[in-house]
Structures are given as structure tokens and as C-alpha cells.
Image: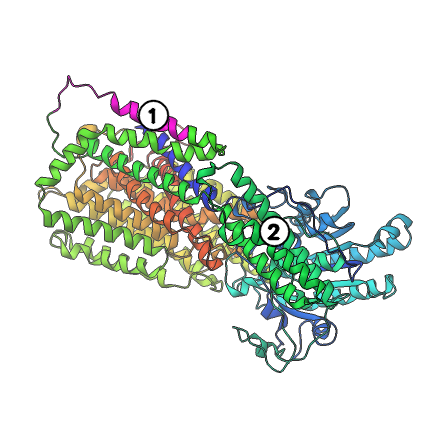
Amino acid sequence: MLLFFALGLLVHFVFFASIFDIYFTSPLVHGMTPQSTPLPPPAKRLVLFVADGLRADTFYELDEDGNSRAPFIRNIIMHEGSWGVSHTRVPTESRPGHVALIAGFYEDVSAVAKGWKENPVEFDSLFNESKYTWSWGSPDILPMFAKGASGDHVYTYSYDAQREDFGADDATKLDTWVFDKVKGFFDAARNNQSLFSKVNEEKVVFFLHLLGIDTNGHAHRPSSREYKDNIKKVDDGVKEIVSIFKHFYGDDGKTTFIFTSDHGMTDWGSHGAGHPSETLTPLVIWGAGIKFPEKVSAQQFDDKFLKEWRLESWKRRDVNQADIAPLMTSLIGVPFPLNSVGTLPVDYLNNTGLFKAESMLTNAVQVLEQFKVKMTQKKEVTLPFLFTPFKLLSDSQQLDILRKARSYIKEEKFDEVVSLCEELIDLALKGLSYYHTYDRLFLGISVAAGFVGWTSYTSLLIIRSHSNIPRGIRKEDKKPHHLLPCSFVAIGVLVACFLLIQACPWTYYVYCLLPVPIWYAVLREYQVIQDLVASLLTFPLSRFVDYLLTFIFGIEVLVLSFFYRCMLTAGLIVFAGWPFLTQLWTRAKITCLSWAFFSLLLAVFPLMPVVGRKPDLSLVMGAGLLVLLLSLAVLTSLLKRKITLVKEELFILLLQMLSIVLSMYVVYSTHHSLLKKEGLPLLNQIVSWATLASSLVVPLLSSTTLSQRLSSTLLSLMSTYLLLSTGYEALFPLVLSCLMFVWIHMEQETLRQPAVSCKQKLTSIQFTHKTDIAQLRQLTLDDIRRAFFLVFFLITAFFGTGNIASINSFDLASVYCFMTVFSPFMMGALMMWKILIPFVLVMCAFEAVQITTQLSSKGLFLIVLVISDIMALHFFFLVKDSGSWLDIGTSISHYVIVMSMTIFLVFLNHLAQLLTTKKLQLCGKPKSHLM
């Protein structure tokens, strides 16, 4: 069985990784020729301001007094330049946003997983193509563009990472640092001849990354005074930098200024998903080569922002974020970034029709080059009779469009050239997507075959080893026919040869060959299949249909709960009524009423707001007080049962109560310290980390009696959970644990014989390593319900207080008791542990259910895996890479969550066994806990 679980983990890791190979491999290709506009550019230099985390609405709207928060840039909009909204894509994070702005393409999912500061894939950028680039700002952003540049012409100046502190007294210092360094740079250039000559070259870029707004948004939310005041500080800084440039270069009219943002921010201070507050960012451009403001009488946009912003009279020019890169390259005359997929927004250019037409044609040729390289690569590794070219853009069509564009330029039909090139870019991008997803159907079928095969094999294993299905008469002398293994070996060889001929990557061999041994293992169980079929034939058809429909309905409810959290509420309401439809109500009225009460109480949580809630310290304090009351109730209950607590266990219980009190104090103290902008107190930080470290050790010192060990585990984990809570979610593990404890009683009642006192048995049950095999029973149909309950509770533990399918559901304020300095991986790990704490509580209860119902843990666990795998197969087919970016991100998250749940179930099952069965001694020999 250990070998089975090891193979199961390996198989699930393969299924988990497959989605990234099938849907989200890097779209980048190499081998293209650089393309640049043949005409002289309008600007010699470009200044790029990126205000990290700046929302378009907060920036453009007027304040309560009717004044702009950025008066200098608003004056630019009305008198000097052009403006619009830049539409970003998911994930709305800093790294992919800057890659889209500066390199012109949307980074694939794998890039984020491989590091924020490094380049997981080589890509070209505006900085790489420039003569020189000087950049100032965050150490999280600047290094990736410097490392990716060829040569030594990209210079970076970053502050220390410790400055990115969400608890700092003034995050605007991050922006002030950048402005001061730029001023110092130009002061130094006047006295340094080498530097002076460099900054006076053509095709140079100055990049100012301003992180203060993002930091204040995370710490105080975008509606805060700090966030809005930071916008004014940035506006003042931009005004000063523009003045310095004009003075340094003698106002030569050869500088272009661009002000924008990498992403926006939600009302609750997070980003990462596809809400308009995250995807809509400001874009203001002025200077050399840019159109002056254009007055219009009416504009048509899907939103109502123009009127709110009082900018309806000035023409708004929206772009996709990746379009800014080709615009910047055309302005200073450098080659377009080789991997750019942006379309030049010619409406921003204040130049001749010829320049616009030539720039647009260069843009089209640059994108077409990527299409041709991608097509060639795919054609070289595909058998000729299997290759299907992209029909909308054949070689002859490419030549025809390019010939027609050249002809229009000679005839000075520049508008027609622009339209034709936009059409060519659109077709080339569709062709790129076509060849990029060329093998998707083939790989999807292979992975789906593996999924179905593995689920079938697990089901057969359950029937063979853990069920009471009658066994057929087997002929011991009959040996398996050699035809079956030979057939599968032949199939494997044929598949391997097919992949070898097409020079497929090694991962293709894994996905395509994995189903072969899995289905061989399935067909080897032909005797079990025969027994199952024979048993089903004797089973009443109506009952079989009822059970099947109930099972399918249950699975669909679980799947729908990922999309609609109210399904969890509906499920819990049904759970509340379940005992009243059975014999349980007549046997255990108090237990049934408790079950109904806590089920309905837990059903409230999925109806609460997922995100956007304001911190509510009173609810966290209330949860802490309830936990203290619970611990007093546990102590009183033990004393009433005349259980003599040894000094060691009494000390542990008091220690856990003290830990709860300390957690409440740390949460209160940290909250008020950050409000006063005094930062995170060191003592609070030490206590928080010490509490986290001890939370998995202290329960191991308590008694292994079922009720005592579960109570001890709850108290220890709750002390950590309080430190990670900001509002009503602090109550969630408490209510969940109460329901889990009642669940244990309910399951015991379902098997209780009339003459046996269930209550008496539960008080004496011990968690133990060794299980008496003689007492274990075989699985029944009711055990499928128990497995379903477990999966439902696990999903409720995930989604009960926050929809983790969306990156923006996380509130960074959750980790402020532990750290306030920005560290994405450490903060992510802490928030992940917050999610897993309810998960661990459910798994500990599951351990108790298995003991009280005399079930084999392996058998019930296998049913859970089958249910999880069926859900995973659902989400595998629901993954999207087209449509709205919110839908795409959500579909990926759903599959990743359910696969992670399946994989982590194995590890968390062992963690739960450790927390419930392991007993540590502080000193001396173990003492008796019972009189």
C-alpha cells in the first residue's frame, strides 16, 4: 500500500504539471531579425515614470473640493499631451506588468513561479535595444531588465529591500529616494564628461519606478489619505524631474515623457486578479512626437468614467498595456522588442502620415517574424502528413498584404496602410496562438486517459481490498495470458517511436506513456471487474440509479461550490437536516440538535463578504475570548469526569490559554502601533514567530485521549490563527471545530448498537499508532457518504472565509503581526498556513472518525482520492486560456487548488496522524491519565 501511495503521488504530480505544459508554456520564440522604423525618430530620449499600484480612477478623479490630486499631470492632459487608460492583463502583479510595458508581451504563468528578480526565459526589451538606460527604484523590478540586457548599457540604482516596509511611518520616502537620486545623477553628469556625453546620446531611456503608492495601498488601502497624498507627492516629483530635464537639455524639444502604472489595486488593498480597479491604469504621454490635447464634443466608452473624471471634453485614447512598448520604441527609433505582441497606437503620434505608416508596417513585420519562426519550428517537428498550417495566413497571403502595404505607401494612402497592418498583426497573433496550442488536443486526451485510468484502478483497488462484494470462483492454476502485457508493451513502443520521430520534448513522453501502464494495471484486475459486474446485476436497478444520481449530484455540488460559494451554504443546510431523516434523531436528540445548530452556524460564513472587508479587531478579540471560554469548559469537563490531570498536562493547558491571551494582546498592540505608523514592535514579532513555531509541538505533549488531544490541537492552532486574522474569519475555525467534534459523535451514533453506551466509549477512546486489524470492518455504501462529508468539509475549510481562486482575495494585513517588510514568498507561506489550519483541524477530526467507526484509514482515504480525482478531471476540461482574463485566472486556480488538495491530502493525513497519535514527554516516564 505504501508503494501505491508513492506511485499515486508521482502520478498526481504529473497531472498537476501537465496543465502548465498544455496551456501555459512560454510563448516566446527566438531567431527573429530586429525591425526598426527607417525614418528619423521625433525624440532623442524617453523618460518613463511607473507609479506602481496606481488606479486610473483614483488618479484621474477630483477630490472632495473639486481639485485634482495630480494638478501638474492634469494640466499636461489639458494643455500639452495625450491621455487614456492602459488595460492590463491577469495576473495584475508588478513583474508581469513591467514586462508588458517594457518588453511588449504578456509573461506566462511559469515565469512568476521561477522568481521575481530573475529571468526564467530570455526576452528582448526596450532597455536592451536602447543605447543607454538608467533606472531607479525597487530591487524587485530593476534587476530583471538589467540581467536580460545584452552588453553593459543598462544601469540600475535600487534602495535596500528593507525599505519596502508596510508598517513604515512614511512609504512616500521610497518615491522621494528615487527623485533625489535622479536629481543627484544630473548634478553629477554636469561634472563628469564621460557621463555627460552618454546622457546626451540619442536613443536613451530613463526609468523611474515609484513604489510608494503601491506600498501605501497595501498598508492603508486606496481610499486612505496616505494613498491619495502619495499621488500628490508623485505629481510634485514628476513636475520637478520634468523641470530638471528641460533645464539640463536646454528645452530642446527632443524628450518624450510617459506616466503610467503597472497595475491598479482593489478597494481592500490587493491585486493580482482581473477586477477593473486592478486592470485599469492611467496613461499620460507628452513631449516630442506626441499629439497635443484634442477637444471633442462626445466620446463613446463602455464605462462612465469620463463624466466622473470631468475629462469628457478631452479625447481619451485607450491602449492595451503591451502596446506601450512599440510606442516607446518608435518614438526614440530603436528596434521593436523581438518578442513584443503590442500594436503601435498611432493615434498618440504627432508626426507625418508617412512616419505612422512606416512605423506601423515595421510593427507588423516584427510580429509576422515571430509567426513565421513559430510555424517553421512546428513544421520541422511534425510529420508532413500530420501538419495542418494556419489557413488564414498562408505564405502567399503574407506576401500579398506586404506588397499591398508598400503600394499604398507609394500612393500616400497612409490610413489604408495602418488599417492593413493592424489586420496583419491580428492574423499573425492568431497564427502564433494556433501554433502555440497545436499539440493541446493530443496532450489533453493523453492526460485525460491517464486520469480516467488512475481513478478506475483506485476504485478497483477499493473493491478488491476493502469491500464485501462477493468474489467469483477463481481457477488457481490459470495463469494470466501473455497477450495482455505484450499488447501494452507494443502500444508503449509505438507511442515512443511516434514521439521520437517528431522530436517531442521529454514531458510529452511522460504524458503519453503514463496511461499505458495505468490501463494495463486496470485490465489486470479483470476478475475484480467481473465480480463487480456480477454484483451490480443482482443489485435492484432502481436503487442503483438512485445511488448513482445521488453520487453524481454530490460531485457536481462540490464542483459548483468552487464557482458559487452559496453552494456551500446550501450543502450545510442539507447536512443540518440529514439526521432528522434517519434513525439518528430517535437515538441521540441532543447530538442531532447540536449537529444542526453548528451546521447552520457554519453555513453563514460562505455568505459573508469574501474580500473588501475592513479590519474588525473586536471580532478577533471576541474569537479569542470564546477560545478561552472553550478551554475553561474543557478543564471543567475533565474535572467533572474525575480525571486526574498530572501537573504536566495542567501546565500545558494553562500554557495554551496564556498563548491565546498573548496572541490577543499582540494583535491589538500591532494594530494600534501600525495605526500610529510606529512599525511592527520587535517583541510582538518575536512572540508571533514563537507562537507559530510551538503550535505544532505543544499538542504532542497532551494526552492522546480523543477529546483532550483534539481540544489541545485546536487551542494551539487557534493562537496562531488569531495572529493571522483581521476580522470575522477568526471565528471560523472555532465553529468548524465544534461541528467536527459533533461529527465524530454523529458517526459513532450511526454504528452504535442499542445496548452500548456511545458516550461512555467516546470518553475512553485513545488515538494510537497501532490499530487492531481484527476490529476493522469492510467498507459499506455509507462510507462513501463519510468520504463525501470529508471532501465537503475540506472545501468549506478552503472557501469558507475567502475565495483563494483569486490572488486578490488575500489581505496582506493578515501577516502584519509577523512581518511588514515586503517578502512575497514568506508572506505567501504565512497566508498559506492560515488557509491550511482549518484543513488540519478537519483532517484531525477525520482521524477520530476513522477510529470511532472502526474503519481502515486506507480504505476511506482511497474513496476520498477517487472523489477528488473526479473533481480534478472536471476542472481539467474547464481550464480556459481565452475569454476574459478573470475567467482564465479562475479556471487555472480551480484546477491547481483541487490537484493541490489531492496531493496535500497525503501529507496532511500524515500530519494529522502525527498531531493525534504522537506523545512527547517533557521529562520522566509517562504517567497515567485516568484513575
Q: Position of residue 546 (x, y in %)?
A: 15, 51
Q: Is residue 450 above or below residue 893?
A: above
Q: Distance between the residues labelled 1 and 2?
A: 43 Å
Give the quadrant of the N terminus: top left
Asked if one can make out residue 107 in the rendered structure from this viewpoint, the answer is no
Label 2 element class: helix
* Closer to the camera in the image, 148 or 670: 148
Q: Where is residue 164 in the image (x, y as percent from the top left)?
A: 64, 52
Label 1 element class: helix
The stretch of residues the image draws in magenta is 474-496
> Residue 368: which disc?
2
Q: Is residue 543 magenta?
A: no
> Residue 490: which disc?
1
Residue 642 sits in quarter: top left
Q: Position of residue 480 (x, y in %)?
A: 21, 21
Going by the numbered disc 1, the residue's amino acid type is: Ala
- Whether residue 40 sits left or right of residue 773 in the image: it is right
